[in-house]
Image (spheres, rainbow, N blue to C red):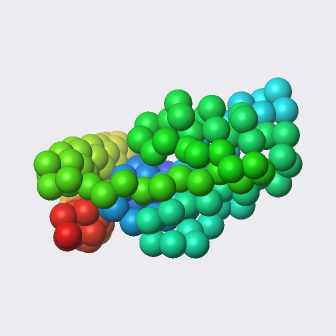
Amino acid sequence: MSRDDILLEAEMAMEKSVNHLVHEFAPVRTGKASPGLVENVDVQAYGSTMKLKQLALITTPEPRLLVVQPFDAGTVRDIERALKESKVGITPAVDGKIIRLPIPELSEERRKELARSLGKMAEEARVRVRANRRTALDEAKKLKTAGELTEDGLRDVEEEVQKLTDRFVKSIDDHLKHKEADILKV
C-alpha cells in the first residue's frame, strides 16, 4: 500500500460516513412531505423484501401529503402493512389503489427531540470519520516501520489525513446545521 492509496482509502471511507449520515437524515421529518421519508421502507412483497420505491410511485401533490401509487394493485396491503410497521410515524390511509400519508404538524417539543436525535446521529458520523483517520494513520505508520515512508513522508501523510478529517467533519456539521434549521423552523 502506498501513501496515495492510504489517502484515497481514507477519503473514500470518510465520504462513505458522510453519505451514510445524509441517508440517516432523510427520513427524519421536517413537517413537510418528501418522498425520502418513505422511499426506503422495506416491504414484504412477492415473497421477498423490497424497497417501497421499487414497488410504487411516491408523489407529493400537497406540501403536507404523500401519495403512494403501487405499480401493482395487489401490493397495496403489503405496502400499507410496511408503512404501519415502519418508524416513520405516519398512519397510512388506503383509498382504493392508492395510499395517502398525511404529514401531521410537528409540536415544538417533538422538533427539539428530533434535533437532539440529529445531533446524536451527527456525532456517530464524526466518530466514524475519526476511526477512518485512525486507520489511515496506522497504515502510514506501518509503511514507515517497513521503511517505505520517511519521517517527513509520515508527517505529510498525517497532515493530509487531518485535512481530510477536518473537511469531512465540517461537512457533517454543515449537514446537521441545515437539517436542524429545517426541523426547528416553524
- x 51%, y 72%: residue: 62
Q: Is residue 2 above or below residue 130?
A: below
Is 104 placed above or below 49 here? below
Is 12 displayed left or right of 170 in the figure?
Answer: right
Depth check: give the residue in front, 172 or 135: 172
The residue most toward the top is 47
Q: Is residue 82 above or below residue 123?
A: above
Total tally of numbered discs in the picture = 0
Regarding residue 133, the answer to whether it shows in the image is: no
Does residue 47 appear anywhere in the picture?
yes
Residue appearing at x 82%, y 54% in the figure: 71
Residue 96: image location, x then y, percent = 75, 49
Left or right, residue 165 beside residue 98? left
Tell me the quarter of the picture where residue 63 sits: bottom left
State the residue in front, 11 or 121.
Answer: 121
Q: Residue at x 20, y 53 (%)?
A: 107
Nearer to us in this view, 77 or 85: 77
Looking at the picture, how far across and down is residue 37, in whole percent? 48, 54
Question: Which residue is drawn at the image coordinates 59% and 54% (left, top)?
Answer: 100
Residue 94, horizontal then vertical, whole percent: 65, 45
Q: Considering only vertical position in the picture, is 129 above or below 49?
A: below
Instruction: Name the side, left or right, on which 18 lies relative to 161.
Output: right
- Looking at the rendering, in which quadrant would you find the C terminus? bottom left
Closer to the camera, 155 or 44?
44
Rendering quarter of residue 45 = top right
